[in-house]
Image: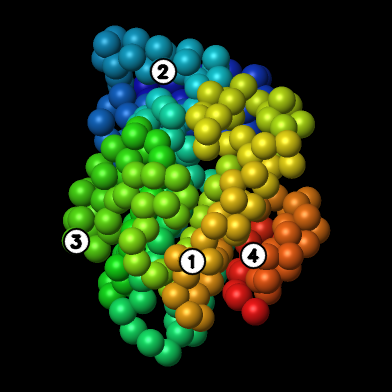
Amino acid sequence: MTTTELLQQSTRRLKACGISSASLDSQLLLAKVLKTSREKLLADAKESLSRAEEKSFRALLRRRLEGESVSYLCARAYFYGQEFYLEPGVLSPRPETELLVEQALVWLDQQERQNLIVTDIGTGSGCIAIALALARPQLLIYATDKSGIAISVAEKNIIQYNLGGRIKLLRGQLCSPLLEKINLLVANLPYLPAADYLKVEAEVTRESAQALYGGEDGLDLIKELIRTCPAKLAPGGAIMLEFDPRQRQNLEKYAKQRKFKPKFHQDLSGKDRVVVLTQN
């Protein structure tokens, strides 16, 4: 069977199971089996597979049909134009989180002083910290996470991009590992409310609950960060957070109670997705 025939067949099966990214998933899985890039796979689409290669691909396809994420099956995820190593137990980066990176870069470019220090709270795979470090070579970044798995995965990605001298990994809860004042705290913390967590797809619940579940209203860790971080912020510093658009009212109210001024930014669909908090 040729790669084209196998891709067509597997895409039909994935579509039949309601998987919207069926074509892309098929290509990524086959590229993994053939140890090639997706681009080269498509360029050589008429090549035939060996029986061993076809067997390996069908085993991966079966697992995908059973609800496993392509990111975990391929041990790879893509974010802000870069490729990242990934393992189960660490959240696969989402496209909407790229807005957080974009707004962080805007904020940094508006600052007059140089040698700014940024912290990525709950770094997971390290994708946000790495995207910022690649975009702004002068930054020093601390990346914190309480998960040992996350720290291990982030370390692999930092080494992959040769950023060990500029991104320092710290294990601990939120801001607790930080020993100096920070100019910008960036965080994509778990914000899935209890009601939503019970209804999400099986593929999503296979990811770390620790990286998804945000308590009854989804704001447990976000509120904890807002409450505990002021002592870690340098004068003129800011906190930047991703959140569920439905949480804006509660988040805005809590931020103002803690003497922060919130500024909201919208995603491509026009929904509130990122908030920048500065101290009054």
Image disc number at residue 92: none
| Residue linked to disc 2 | 60
Type of the residue with mark 1:
Ala
Residue toward you, 4 or 253: 253
Is residue 257 left or right of 60 when viewed as pictured? right
Q: CA distance from mark 3 to mark 2?
A: 37 Å
Q: Residues within 10 Å of mark 2 (few under 14, many from 20)?
A: many
Type of the residue with mark 4:
Val
| Residue linked to disc 1 | 231
Looking at the image, is 208 positioned above or below residue 82? above
Labelled pair 2, 1 in contact (Cβ < 8 Å)? no
For this orientation, the residue located farthest to the bottom is 112
| Residue linked to disc 3 | 165
Mark 4 or mark 2, which is nearer to you?
4
Q: CA distance from mark 2 to mark 1?
A: 48 Å
Which of marks 1 and 2 precedes in the sequence? 2
**Residue at 61% over, 69% down:** 276
Type of the residue with mark 2:
Leu
Q: CA distance from mark 4 to mark 3?
A: 29 Å
| Residue linked to disc 4 | 275
What is the number of callouts on the image? 4
The chosen color scheme is rainbow
**Residue at 41% over, 61% down:** 119
Q: State the SS at label 4.
A: strand
Q: State the SS at label 3.
A: loop
Residue toward you, 66 or 130: 130
